[in-house]
Image: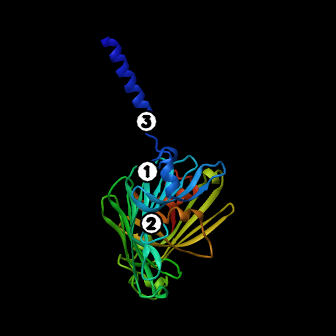
């Protein structure tokens, strides 16, 4: 008799375990069929009839919630207080981890991103945060100001701090205030100062910049040359890279198979290291790699040799394979 009772208890436990298995897909979410009918304002479907967008009058004690789903049924984005302000936006990756949060609000008759915007990597570490402020009265006078902090991967160490500004009615996003770059030991390796962010004259003129760092040392002045063989999409193609460094400017030139680039760079001289950053295009040239990084890396003098580590070159030419290039200097 006791054995029969034990068997019954075990059977009930197994039934409870498997019948209560948690599922994060939309179909088994906390929205009951009855509540879904009451709360649903709009539904948009994928071609295979899976839910793509769902607009609810109430969801998890929040009003006017819009949910966006991946095709596999996982939540892609959640918007709280949809079409009203302030509006909170949450973006998730395919594994259900939060990767982006931002808020939109009324800034005196205009709608813009406000407050603190945060980006996380797939491991839950903050990779970037942006603080949005503004100045000006009417929408036509509004200047949107962004303080951007980027962090080294997997750490809380700041990699860079940059400030930019743009007009609400549309302009280029221009540098303003101070810009600082740090190494992983939290040492400042580059520092620039631009026009005040609240300045109502929105422009990105070259003379806005005032470098706080020292000018380029004479030992760096000259032409540097590098021949490299591409990888990935550029496999087998040969390219010639030139750096022309003068006292007050640096020109980067690249030539090769179906390619011509010419960019103006800025530099920070730290003794035996020269840090390079993209500033603007020359000869109306551009590169898709600039959307990935504007970091042209650093040149180091070691045992009389010039060694160049460059995230831009790795992205553009070697399929992100990290390479330290030995470049020749022509005086």
Residue at image coords 42%, 54% = 98
Between disc 3 and disc 1, whose residue precedes? 3
Q: Position of residue 194 (x, y in %)?
A: 40, 81
Quadrant showing the N terminus: top left
Judged from this view, the residue extending furthest toward the right is: 258
Q: Position of residue 11 (x, y in %)?
A: 40, 22
Residue 226 visible: yes
Between disc 3 and disc 2, whose residue precedes? 3
Could you say which is closer to the camera, residue 55 or residue 317?
55
Q: Secondary structure at mark 1?
A: loop
Position of residue 319 in the picture relative to residue 221 (left or right): right
Q: Position of residue 39 (x, y in %)?
A: 49, 57
Task: Tell how many labels.
Answer: 3
Could you say which is closer to the camera, residue 265 or residue 329?
265
Q: Quadrant of residue 107?
A: bottom left
Foreground label between 3 and 1? 3
Foreground label between 1 and 2? 2
Residue 81: numbered disc: 2
Disc 3 to disc 1, C-alpha distance:
20 Å
Between disc 1 and disc 2, whose residue precedes? 2
Q: Secondary structure at mark 3?
A: loop
Could you say which is closer to the camera, residue 92 or residue 223?
92
Disc 1 to disc 2, C-alpha distance:
21 Å
Q: Which residue is mark 1?
A: 97
Residue at image coords 50%, 63% = 293
Q: Which residue is mark 3?
A: 21
Q: Secondary structure at mark 2?
A: loop
Check if mark 3's residue and mark 1's residue have beta carbons within 8 Å. no
Residue 307 visible: no
Position of residue 215 in the picture relative to residue 76 (left or right): left
In the image, residue 93 above or below residue 300: above
């Amino acid at each position: 008799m006791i054995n029969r009772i034990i068997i019954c208890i075990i059977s009930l436990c197994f039934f409870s375990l498997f019948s209560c298995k948690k599922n994060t897909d939309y179909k088994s979410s906390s929205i009951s069929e009855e509540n879904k009918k009451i709360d649903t304002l709009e539904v948009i479907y994928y071609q295979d009839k899976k839910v793509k967008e769902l607009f609810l009058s109430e969801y998890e004690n929040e009003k006017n919630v819009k949910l966006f789903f991946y095709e596999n049924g996982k939540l892609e984005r959640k918007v709280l207080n949809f079409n009203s302000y302030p509006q909170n936006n949450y973006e998730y990756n395919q594994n259900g981890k939060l990767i982006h949060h931002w808020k939109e609000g009324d800034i005196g008759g205009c709608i813009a991103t406000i407050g603190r915007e945060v980006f996380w990597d797939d491991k839950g570490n903050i990779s970037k945060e942006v603080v949005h402020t503004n100045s000006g009265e009417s929408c036509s006078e509004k200047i949107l100001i962004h303080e951007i902090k980027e962090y080294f991967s997997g750490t809380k160490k700041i990699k860079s701090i940059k400030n930019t500004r743009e007009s609400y009615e549309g302009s280029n996003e221009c540098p303003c205030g101070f810009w600082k770059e740090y190494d992983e030991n939290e040492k400042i390796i580059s520092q620039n100062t631009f026009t005040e962010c609240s300045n109502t004259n929105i422009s990105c003129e070259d003379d806005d910049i005032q470098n706080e760092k020292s000018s380029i040392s004479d030992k760096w002045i000259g032409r540097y040359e590098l021949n490299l063989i591409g990888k990935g999409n550029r496999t087998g193609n040969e390219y010639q890279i030139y750096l022309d460094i003068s006292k007050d400017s640096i020109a980067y030139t690249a030539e090769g198979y179906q390619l011509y680039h010419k960019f103006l760079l800025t530099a920070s001289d730290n003794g035996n290291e020269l840090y390079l950053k993209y500033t603007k295009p020359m000869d109306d040239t551009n590169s898709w790699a600039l959307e990935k990084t504007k970091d042209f890396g650093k040149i180091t003098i070691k045992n009389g040799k010039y060694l160049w580590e460059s995230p831009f070159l790795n992205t553009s030419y070697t399929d992100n394979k990290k390479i330290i290039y030995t470049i020749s200097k022509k005086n």
